[in-house]
Each structure stands twice: as C-alpha cells, then as structure tokens.
Amino acid sequence: MGRRIVKQTNGKYSVWSTIVDNFILVNMSKRKLRKFFIAEAIKEATRDFEYRFQDLEDEYPMSHYLEMVRDIHGEEELEDIVKEIELNESCN
C-alpha cells in the first residue's frame, strides 16, 4: 500500500494514499502519526505471521528442509543443525 507523509502548511502532517489518490489522514501530530504507522505495522506483521501458520499441515516436513541443508551446505552443516535442534529439545 503506497502512502506518503505530507507536511501541511500549519506544521502538522497528512498521509496521502496512492491507492485512493486522496488523503487518508490529516492534521496529525508527529506523535500520533508514529502511533498510526506502528499500529499498522503490527497489524501487517500479525497478518503475515498468521498466514505463515494457516497451512502448516500442508507444508513440507522438516526432513525435506534438512535434506536441502545437506544438499546445499553439506553433511557437517546438517549435523550442526540437528545437534542444535536436539539440544533445544533436551532443554525443554
């Protein structure tokens, strides 16, 4: 989503949307604008996080990725990864 911050002549800020070609916020202080963008970023990150988990059952199994590590980086890297996973499992 394309958004641009525009400084108004009165010293406050507006946000211009390139999607609707209009202002979506006006007369915002820098503090309020920061809060708005932080809240939007949190919403986007939450959506992204949930999207990554929604079809986890249909994804490749861990063994698929471990084979890729071995094929691309070699047996030693694979062993390091497996050891790290096993170490974390034993700590839980």
Image (tube, rainbow, N blue to C red):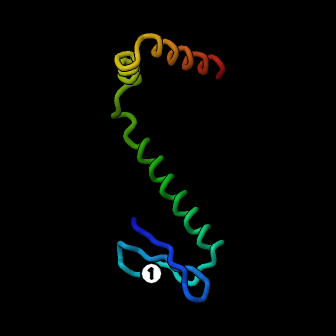
Q: Position of residue 69 (x, y in %)?
A: 40, 20
x and y, in percent, of residue 86 in the image: 56, 16
Q: Can residue 80 be seen by looking at this rendering?
A: yes
Q: Nearer the viewer, residue 66 or 76?
A: 76
**Residue 63 appears in view:** no
The residue located at (56%, 79%) in the rendering is 13
Observer-nearest of 16 and 38: 16
Q: Where is residue 3 in the image (x, y as percent from the top left)?
A: 44, 70
Q: Nearer the viewer, residue 69 or 5?
A: 5
**Residue 54 figure quarter:** top left
What residue sits 51% from the left and 58% below the top?
43
Could you say whether the residue bearing mark 1 is in a helix, strand or loop? Answer: strand
Toward the viewer: 13 or 59? 13
Q: Report which residue position mark 1 lands on.
A: 23
- Figure check: 19 above or below 52: below
Where, quadrant-wise, is the C terminus in this rendering? top right
Image location of residue 34, percent across then percent down? 61, 67
Q: Which residue is drawn at 35% across and 77% down?
A: 20
Which picture quadrant has residue 16? bottom left
> Is 49 displayed left or right of 35 in the figure?
left
